[in-house]
Amino acid sequence: MLKRSLSLIVFLLTISPLFAQNMDYINLLNRANTPRIFIDDFIYPSEDGKSNLSIFFRFDNDFLPFKKITPSDKIKPPKGYQFYTITRLNSEIFEGKGSKRNSNNIAVKSRDVWIDTLYTKTFEETESKEQYASGSLTNKLESGNYHYVLQLSLMDNTNERNSSRNEVTIPDWKEKKTGEIVYVSAVNESDTGVVLPLMNLEDNVYFGKDFYAVIRIPQYSSSENYTISVSKARISRNDTTAGESVYTSPIKADEIHTNSYLQLKHGENPSFNLKSGSNFTYAVVKLPNSTFDNSAYLLELKKSGSDQILAKKTFRSYWQNMPASLYSLEVSIDMMKYIVSENQLRDLKSGDRKEKEKKFREFWSSKDPTPKTVYNELMAEYYRRIDYSFKEFSNRGNYAGHESDQGQVYIKYGPPESKERKFPTDGKVLEVWNYPNRKFVFEASTGFGDFVLLGTE
């Protein structure tokens, strides 16, 4: 399975493990706010033993150009919806490897198209990362070498934007000695087979949430035992290798589905049906991702007692609304200045990178309200407040809203139960924040939304 990007549209950020980048806070905010698109392809055998090349995609709302619906628009939105966008994606498959020299003379072998109109009720939803348009394209192909191009058009723009040429090899399934892996979010029994909703995040999986791996076992033998293992991934430019092992489990008999095949269900959220009726064997295995750190991993399938790898695939933690500060260890530690003493902060900043990360994790682990899970709600909320304060309390005099008086109070105590404005006839505007056991009184200092703390009650 290969990741694909529409290079003329947007560059894709690779979601890295915690603290992978050393950037200043403003750059981290820009990175966290960059729109994401996910495009992936998957080659798998069909019921008749031929091959399907399926392309899955997801465009988050903040990537798509929405328009306010007006009476002149010739569309009929559902009741209560105010904005819309139209998105079209089509694939063209060509025989042979991609070559710019003769690309204009190659006939299209196969093509598929997807088009959808997406509506939202509010402007905020048009900028959401939680809402998205998603779908799939599928082409049935004989074994051989191919390349394909994706073409995307948005709204009324007739100038389609092309991806680079992506090469794929369609195998002979009788000869292929390695299996394929696809990640799904759930396993649901139905009258037509087992329904497997796709994760549809390329090789990413949601941080802190369990998921399932669907693995084709090549040349399956009922007399053999099979094992899956998860290791920290060592990713280089040329290869990905297994590092520290974090999980190993034998595949149980009830996780194996013999004489089966995958059938893609197209729709708003693509899924596979695992159906009986062919001579392929699949394992559907649950992975306890809620116990894995925010990192990159390598999943491998082997015969028990053997070092031969029968299938492998990487996956990365994807924290959808990861606070910007957590992309850099240095920034994460520096932002703790609002809740620790100067001596504590000096100690957290001392030592090499490994020592600093260890002390940082130990600090937040000691305050984790749910220590049996890897997701630390308290830490996430603290750094979320920093991002919120930066945006909410910035003004012409101070663009770093998290460093303002109101920003620091919000970071320490969270949102107040209520706020009230007072307009003295002989003084500056006052703003009072009410908490259960205290009040904070702020005074307008410049007239541009910059409030300074007068005192507490």
Image (tube, rainbow, N blue to C red):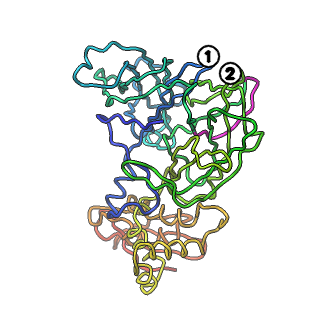
Q: Is residue 26 left or right of residue 376?
A: left
Residue projecting furthest to the left: 101
Residue topped by disc 1: 48
Residue topped by disc 2: 278
Residue 269 magenta-highlighted = no
Q: Is any part of residue 431 visible from this angle?
A: yes
Q: Which residues are magenta?
A: 183-192
Q: Is residue 57 left or right of residue 427?
A: right
Residue drawn at point x = 70 percent, y = 25 percent: 275
Q: Is residue 234 above or below residue 90?
A: below
Q: Are marks 2 and 1 in contact (CB under 8 Å)?
A: yes
Residue 150 placement: quadrant = top left
Q: Residues within 10 Å of mark 2 (few under 14, many from 20)?
A: some
Residue 184 magenta-highlighted = yes
Chain-order first, disc 2 or disc 1: 1
Of residue 108 and residue 225, the one placed in the foreground of this image is 225
Of residue 131 and residue 6, the one placed in the foreground of this image is 6
Residue 287 screen position, x and y as percent:
65, 49
Residue 403 screen position, x and y as percent:
36, 70
Q: Is residue 173 left or right of residue 348?
A: right
